Amino acid sequence: MGRSPCCEKAHTNKGAWTKEEDERLIAHIKVHGEGCWRSLPKAAGLLRCGKSCRLRWINYLRPDLKRGNFTQEEDELIIKLHGLLGNKWSLIAARLPGRTDNEIKNYWNTHIKRKLLSRGIDPATHRPVMELAEKKEEKVGNGEVGHEASSWQCPDLNLELCISPPSQEPVKMEKTTLCFSCGSSECKCDTNFLGLSSGVLDYRNEHMK
DNA sequence: AAGTTTATCAACCGCGATACG
DNA sequence: CCGTATCGCGGTTGATAAACT
């Protein structure tokens, strides 16, 4: 038996939201708050599935959203975070107040990818394109396939990204916050615009294999 | 001016994770 | 512990605007 559909497709609207639908959704959430997306459409009088309502609210209607162009600082921050976390858009978005994962993902795919390529950096690996091409050639020559280097230095971040099997003894990490500008847990620089919490580091250590 | 191509971004889909009975 | 329901994430699609021929 397969998964049941998230909603009754025959009786739900799809595609672009109308002004009236937006207003209904906003009004409902203002009164009842977020949550229980499954039952929200019926309660709000919307012919939409809960998933669609959630997406519309999170990506477009939330009052704390910062609309408009990304700043140079945001650009660089996204690049750095992507270097650390990969396509973990929700984690990246969590470090950019007012920006959504969907917005960042779109921005990455349409702007930043091209920007990095024009700098000669591979957007997927954050390594110089030339270096990758050379490595590939080297491996083909040696008959090696399918194994990336186990660790490397990200030149921009000056952080070591280690890819290794989970260790038997869990790494104990202090609950510290690292500044992205100076990389210190005892940041004294002015910016401290990115507090890289150990939660993010934990995530990286546990999942970025 | 009309047709075509490209860029942008809102929205959808499928699936894994988690909660719950 | 197991099966089901729901949530949330990431990849992808499609509509539309803008740029180009």
Image: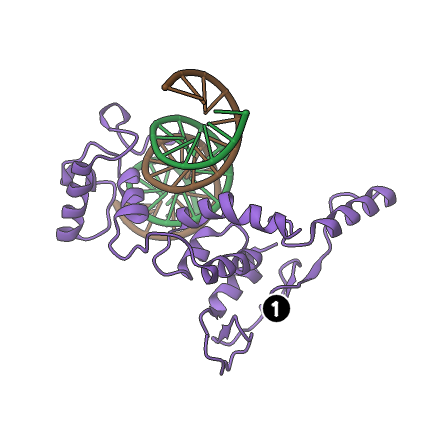
Chain colours: A purple, B brown, C green
The image quadrant that residue A184 belongs to is: bottom right
Which residue occupies 41% across, 50% down? A101
Q: Position of residue A171 (x, y in %)?
A: 58, 70
Which residue occupies 52% across, 70% down? A180
Q: Position of residue A141 (x, y in %)?
A: 87, 43
Identify which amino acid the numbered label 1 is placed on. Answer: Glu
As drawn, the residue found furthest toward the right would be A142
- Residue A4 visible? The answer is no
Q: What residue does disc 1 label?
A: A169
Q: Position of residue A185 (x, y in %)?
A: 52, 78
Left or right of A170: which side holds A91? left
Which residue occupies 14% across, 47% down? A27
Which residue occupies 24% across, 54% down? A63
Q: Quadrant of the N terminus of chain A?
A: top left
Mark 1 secondary-structure assignment? loop
Left or right of C15: which side holds B6? right
Q: Disc 1: which chain? A: A
Q: Quadrant of the C terminus of chain A?
A: bottom right
Is residue A43 depicted above or below A9 in this figure? Answer: below
Q: For mark 1, does the 10 Å Cα neighbourhood hold few (<14), some (14 to 19), or many (20 or more) residues?
A: few
Left or right of A22: which side holds A151? right
- Residue A11 visible? The answer is yes
Foreground pick, C11 / A202: C11
The image quadrant that residue A126 belongs to is: bottom right
Q: Position of residue A114 (x, y in %)?
A: 57, 46
Foreground pick, C6 / A123: A123
Foreground pick, A189 / A33: A189
